[in-house]
Image (cartoon, rainbow, N blue to C red):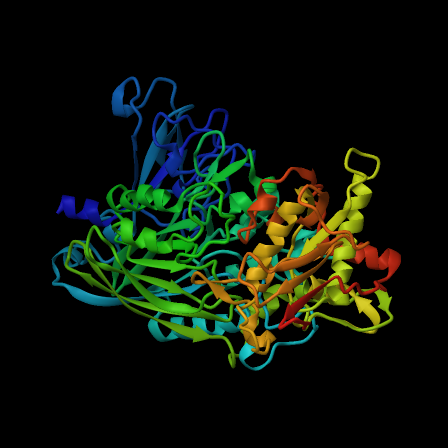
């Protein structure tokens, strides 16, 4: 009987104790500033040197004082993991603190350098506090197997889509374009009502706080955002998320902003493979413990969070020397067995902010795989369900066989931008001592047609209106309309505006220095097919629609040969066009090569040189007539200062030339803000420069 109780009722809470710190912190949630020495197992809890103290932990309260109302009652015991003089009773000088709010007052040791594990026994399995007497406990252990059902609901790649609102057009989305957490919340609440909240889990898989003007408004601390809770945190809190993963875009605004967002969340923000650069210990909680009761029996679900190492490439300026994002397969191999064997979870869910197979890395980048979701499922036994993301695919159900066990593992990927959720059904059979888990299937549930949840609307109403007021502010007057609808296949004034602002900014930054005499080239991608700068008054939202990513400006030194190679790589974006065939922009742009789609944002257009792209020629031989603006051919040895965004600076999209090039400028200035500042100072009357064109069959497009 005792052994069975021990197996059933443990929720293990590893603690790292820090020199000079007075607070004892929960397991999977030790915060920055908890500098535990690795003589025990502090990495389980997390460690970093970012200088902030712990916060109260949902479900356990603040362990530095009285437990909050609603925390789990029951016995608390402890044991030492590290070898300490004097054995398990603790080393000389350990300080033990009494917590009166936990089972009448139990002690927890707080030494300077050792690690400890707190074992939480919940009332349902604790005879001393069991409501209903010992018969209930006996029944729990002796009844025959009973089948229960658990529902896992998931979102991923929300990218700021709290409401069904297009901030670029200042109007709701309609029809199949409807999306947003407010509408998704209605689906979630309906499922909870149908099946009981205790049998439903809700998780998010990252890329949350970047992606639309609402996010940018808060990230830039614009006037009106002060004293407001971040709208994504507000929405997640009222929706009752159980765990939230970190995505690569969470790092776009720097660690301090991410820590601030984390503090506003009720659920834990996970990142098992986001580790301190010095200690190698997790900066964020590695996992969350989710407790549910199915037909009166407790089931413990460990939720592990992993994110793509690509963040170290794309946001290296924000992360280098502070944190490392390590190999996802290695991290999963390290943590999943521990969740099973040490923390005794009945079920393991992996939130994997990565997809399957494809990569946007430069070909010569030495970095762990960007999208190893399949490899994790194949190589790491013990996973029941994986929620995947990052690639923005709508693939609710994929099965991958684990090689070690021969068991299929479900990989579910919800539709991005809160356009839907996935609903995974799990059968859990209890045999009196343990749970047998069988994942049945996953089904998509989409947002269009759903009524918004009033709780979410209310939670973000002030933030929404403040954002609208900001983005509708007029910044310029345009003498003509500029559209991006055909920017991906011909030179347009809309793209020229971006290019001129980038090139002028870099030229001014280099003036008076070693590289002042270099011709400046600008590179940018057509990031929107629907942006329109109207004739007449131009607002911030008009300019934001023109440049949708929160990128910063940089510049590198390229030779003429490297520039040509860069443009040849970009020209892969177009389909192969046989002689005599008509070019169709709808089907012959953003093509798939080697099993990977070349997205619009991966296609670079150059400004400051003239060139042609011959679609009748094979990839690698398409750039012809590459010339300086005065007509002189570009020689291989010529040198250029090349303006580009920080994402491309990393080599993302396979552009290895810029990834290896000397950096001439990188002041981390936001490109969208540069456009706004330019419009305020100069307007947007930019002359169009037809500096590039597509050619085929000896004629231009």
Quadrant in which the C terminus appears: bottom right
Residue located at (78% from left, 33% from top): 514
**Residue 334 shown left or right of residue 392 in the figure:** left
**Residue 57 shown left or right of residue 121 in the figure:** right
Where in the figure is residue 505, as x and y percent of width and height?
Answer: 79, 48
Where in the figure is residue 449, as x and y percent of width and height?
Answer: 52, 81
Residue located at (60% from left, 50% from top): 565
Front in this rendered view, residue 210 or 693: 693
Residue 344: in sight, yes or no? yes
Quarter holding residue 198: bottom left
Where in the figure is residue 392, as x and y percent of width and height?
Answer: 48, 64
Quarter holding residue 193: bottom left
Q: Is residue 421 shown above or below 123?
A: below
Front in this rendered view, residue 347 or 264: 347
Residue 650: in sight, yes or no? no
**Residue 424 shown left or right of residue 415 in the figure:** left
Front in this rendered view, residue 447 or 666: 666
């Amino acid at each position: 009987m005792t052994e069975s109780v021990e197996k059933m009722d443990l929720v293990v809470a590893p603690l790292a104790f820090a020199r000079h710190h007075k607070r004892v912190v929960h397991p999977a949630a030790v915060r920055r500033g908890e500098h535990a020495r690795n003589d025990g197992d502090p990495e389980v809890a997390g460690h970093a040197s970012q200088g902030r103290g712990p916060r109260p932990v949902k479900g356990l309260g603040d362990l530095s004082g009285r437990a909050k109302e609603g925390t789990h009652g029951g016995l608390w015991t402890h044991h030492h993991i590290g070898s300490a003089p004097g054995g398990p009773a603790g080393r000389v000088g350990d300080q033990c603190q009494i917590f009166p709010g936990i089972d009448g007052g139990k002690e927890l040791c707080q030494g300077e350098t050792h690690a400890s594990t707190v074992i939480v026994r919940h009332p349902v399995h604790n005879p001393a506090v069991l409501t209903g007497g010992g018969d209930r406990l006996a029944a729990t252990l002796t009844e025959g197997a009973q089948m229960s059902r658990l529902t896992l609901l998931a979102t991923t790649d929300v990218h700021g889509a709290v409401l069904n609102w297009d901030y670029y057009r200042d109007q709701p989305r309609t029809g199949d374009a409807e999306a947003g957490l407010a509408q998704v919340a209605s689906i979630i609440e309906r499922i909870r009502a149908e099946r009981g909240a205790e049998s439903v889990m809700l998780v998010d898989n990252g890329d949350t706080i970047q992606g639309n003007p609402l996010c940018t408004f808060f990230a830039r601390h614009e006037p009106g955002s002060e004293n407001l809770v971040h709208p994504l945190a507000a929405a997640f809190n009222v929706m009752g998320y159980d765990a939230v993963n970190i995505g690569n875009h969470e790092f776009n605004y720097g660690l301090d902003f991410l820590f601030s967002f984390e503090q506003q969340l009720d659920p834990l923000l996970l990142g098992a493979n986001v580790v301190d650069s010095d200690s190698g210990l997790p900066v964020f909680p590695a996992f969350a413990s989710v407790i549910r009761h199915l037909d009166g029996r407790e089931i413990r679900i460990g939720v592990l969070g992993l994110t793509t190492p690509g963040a170290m490439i794309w946001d290296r300026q924000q992360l280098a020397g502070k944190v490392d994002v390590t190999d996802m397969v290695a991290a999963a191999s390290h943590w999943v067995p521990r969740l099973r064997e040490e923390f005794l979870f009945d079920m393991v869910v992996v939130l994997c902010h990565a997809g399957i197979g494809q990569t946007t890395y430069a070909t010569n980048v030495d970095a762990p795989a960007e999208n190893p979701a399949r490899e994790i499922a194949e190589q790491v036994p013990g996973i029941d369900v994986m929620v995947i993301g990052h690639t923005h695919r709508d693939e609710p159900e994929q099965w991958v066989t684990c090689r070690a066990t021969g068991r299929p593992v479900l990989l579910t990927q919800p539709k991005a931008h809160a356009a839907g959720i996935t609903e995974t059904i799990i059968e859990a059979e209890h045999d009196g001592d343990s749970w047998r888990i069988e994942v049945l299937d996953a089904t998509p549930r989409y947002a269009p047609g759903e009524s918004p949840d009033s709780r979410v609307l209310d939670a973000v109403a002030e933030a929404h209106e403040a954002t609208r007021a900001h983005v509708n502010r007029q910044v310029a007057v345009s003498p003509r309309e500029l559209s991006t609808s055909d920017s991906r296949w011909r030179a347009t004034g809309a793209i020229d505006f971006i290019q001129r602002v980038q090139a002028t900014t870099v030229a001014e930054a280099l003036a008076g220095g070693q590289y002042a005499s270099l011709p400046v080239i600008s590179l940018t991608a057509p990031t929107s097919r629907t942006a329109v700068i109207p004739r007449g008054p131009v607002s911030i939202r008009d300019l934001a629609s023109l440049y949708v990513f929160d990128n910063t400006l940089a510049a590198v030194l390229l030779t003429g040969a490297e520039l040509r190679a860069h443009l040849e790589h970009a020209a892969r974006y177009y389909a192969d066009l046989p002689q005599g065939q008509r070019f169709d922009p709808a089907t012959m742009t953003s093509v798939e090569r080697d099993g990977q789609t070349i997205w619009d944002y991966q296609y670079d257009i150059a400004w400051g040189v003239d060139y042609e792209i011959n679609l009748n020629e094979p990839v690698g031989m398409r750039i012809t007539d590459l010339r300086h603006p005065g007509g002189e051919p570009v020689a291989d040895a010529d040198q250029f200062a090349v303006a580009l965004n920080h994402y491309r600076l990393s080599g993302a999209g396979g552009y290895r030339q810029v990834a290896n090039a000397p950096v001439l400028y990188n002041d981390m200035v936001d490109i969208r803000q540069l456009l706004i500042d330019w419009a305020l100072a100069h307007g947007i009357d930019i002359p169009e420069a037809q500096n590039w064109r597509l050619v085929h069959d000896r004629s231009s497009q």
